Image: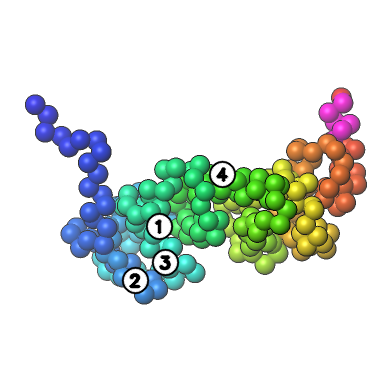
Amino acid sequence: MSTAAPPNDDLMPSFFNNNMFSDVILRFGKYEINAHKVILAQQSKWFLSKFREDPTYIGVYKLDNTSHPDTLLHVLRYMYHSGWVHDCLLKPEVVYPLGRLSNLYDVADRYNIGALKHKVNLCFWYSSINDLDRLAEVPTYDSQFIRHIHKICGADSEPFDDDTLQKTVVHLCAKYHKTLLKIDELSNSYNQDLLFNAKCAAMFAEEYAVVSLAGDGWGRERNPDLHEKDLLARER
């Protein structure tokens, strides 16, 4: 008779902020968390690299490279298979606040947590689609997505090491350009080169060429030759 624990009997959550077997203390913001190097390094390439610098060190690590300490706490809980981030991201089709997802991605990017970045980006995609479909139906709708275009892709946005979320935002801008173009503020910002930073503006030009052959909207205003070249390429 097997004495193995059932597959769903996950003990990992019980070790969060537990000094049992803890070999590192993480200090950030107002928090001080008992943690375990092997758990952090298994999921975060940033922690893996940090711990490799001095594998025998046991003590306090000050985490100063985050502007979202509360979000970092939730991410650490996620790494221990607990908390709302772990539970919610199992259902990417559920609508989540884009600001919360953006902060999660920022922390996941800073600490290079690949699985979390992928899950957050997928959730951002589904939630943004829901938001933009609503905007298409109700032009006066207060769109979360619009408020995050500049935050994620704007000239003064914080750079990401992994630009996957930026690519998602740019792709959705191109996909929904006809809806977004009706908003004067966005149209004016784009025409004045204020909506996107240079990298995202180049991404948008490429995405627009793929999703539209109509010759209207931002792509034509910003690059009149874009659609003509694309049409000729497809006719060959």
Look at the numbered disc 2 and give the secondary structure of its residue: strand
According to the image, label 3 marks what residue? 70
- Give the extent of the magenta segment: 230-235
The residue closer to the viewer here, 132 or 49, is 132
Q: Would you say the residues marked 2 and 1 are in contact, meaning their CB atoms lie under 8 Å apart?
A: no
- Quarter holding the N terminus is top left
Q: Main secondary structure of the magenta part?
A: helix
- Which numbered circle lies on residue 75? 1
- For the residue marked with disc 1, what is the amino acid? Val
Q: Residue at x 42, y 66 (%)?
A: 70
According to the image, label 4 marks what residue? 126
- For the residue marked with disc 4, what is the amino acid? Tyr
**Distance between the Cα atoms at labels 1 and 3?**
9 Å
**Distance between the Cα atoms at labels 2 and 3?**
9 Å
Image quarter of residue 198: bottom right
Q: How far across and how far down the image is residue 58, in percent?
A: 26, 65
Look at the numbered disc 4 and give the secondary structure of its residue: helix
Q: Would you say the residues marked 1 and 3 are in contact, meaning their CB atoms lie under 8 Å apart?
A: no
